[in-house]
Image (cartoon, helix red, strand yellow):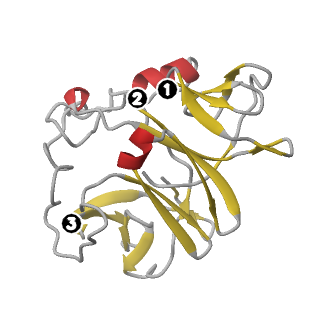
Amino acid sequence: MYRRTVGGKVLDFGTTGFLRFSNLIMYDRQTESWWQEFGGEAIVGDMVGTKLEHLYLSIDSWGEFKAAFPKGKVLSRETGHDRDYGSNPYAGYDQDVPFPYNGPGDSRLQLMDRVVAVIIGDKSLAVPFSVLRKEPAVHYRLNGQDLVVFYQEGTASSIDSSSISEGRDVGATGVFDPHLDGEKLTFQMKDDAFVDDQTGSTWNLFGRATSGRLAGKELTPIVHGG
């Protein structure tokens, strides 16, 4: 997710219909520049080299969102267009090798393995979901920044089955600064919830304490992809 204001100008985006390295290419209607969805950088046109500001985004299940934000706003499906928003035209896309992809590979992971990607300054980190399934709270220090990655099962893949609601469970993640009120917290998963070792408070996937001494407190989110 990106901020669409660049140099004081608000841009409107559409889809070019093209892929690069099997990744969506967007365009803005103001300058008709083309933008790579991954990284948010303009690759063709007047805006070449310009990067959109990356904002925090977490892809979670409806159940998790509704429980955490019972008064949260939800986009209506009544858009005026005859479209089935619950369907996926690219069934099986997140399996094996993406199409059409002819870029470099990497023997450390399969091309379509899901990862949490964090970039801080000139340093980057990828935490595979396969690791998170075994260790749902991962602590790391990247370029001087402490962070904790949360993982929880219960979110369907949107690009697995032709019906999104029937997609395989791939889980969801959140990345946060573990410092709160001058104290560094450490976490572990207990009974399907995150619990900090320092106070025994329970936290949800959105980095908010739901019970215990720290109930109502929130961790500072760290921008990531995944």
Indicate the position of residue 40 as horizontal and vertical percent values. Answer: 45, 66
Q: Provide the secondary structure element on which disc 3 rests.
A: strand
Name the residue tied to disc 1: 65
Residue 187 falls in image quadrant = top right
Could you say where residue 183 lies in the image, as x and y percent from the top left?
83, 43
Specify whether 11 is left or right of 68: left
What residue is pinned by disc 3?
A: 18
Against 55, is 35 above or below? below
Q: Amino acid at mark 1?
A: Phe
Quadrant location of residue 13? bottom left
Label 3–label 2 contact, CB within 8 A? no
Do the residues under discs 1 and 2 have CB atoms within 8 angstroms?
A: yes
Inspect this view and state whether residue 69 appears: no
Label 1 – label 3 distance at C-alpha:
32 Å
> Which mark is on residue 61?
2
Secondary structure under tag 2 reads: loop
Q: Is residue 121 visible?
A: yes
Q: Amino acid at mark 2?
A: Ser
Give the distance between the C-alpha atoms of the residues marked 3 and 2, in whole angstroms. Answer: 28 Å
Q: Amino acid at mark 3?
A: Phe
| Image height of 136 relative to 165, above or below | below
Between the residue at mark 1 and the residue at mark 2, the CA separation in whole angstroms equals 6 Å
**Which sits in the foreground, 66 or 160?**
160
Please say if the residues under marks 1 and 3 sit with CB atoms less than 8 Å apart.
no
**Would residue 55 be found to the left or right of residue 216 on screen?**
left
Q: Is the residue marked by circle 1 packed among few (<14), some (14-19), or many (20+) residues within 10 Å?
A: some
Q: Position of residue 56 (x, y in %)?
A: 56, 49
The label number, if any, that marks residue 187 in the structure image: none
Compared to residue 8, the image places residue 44 above or below, namely below
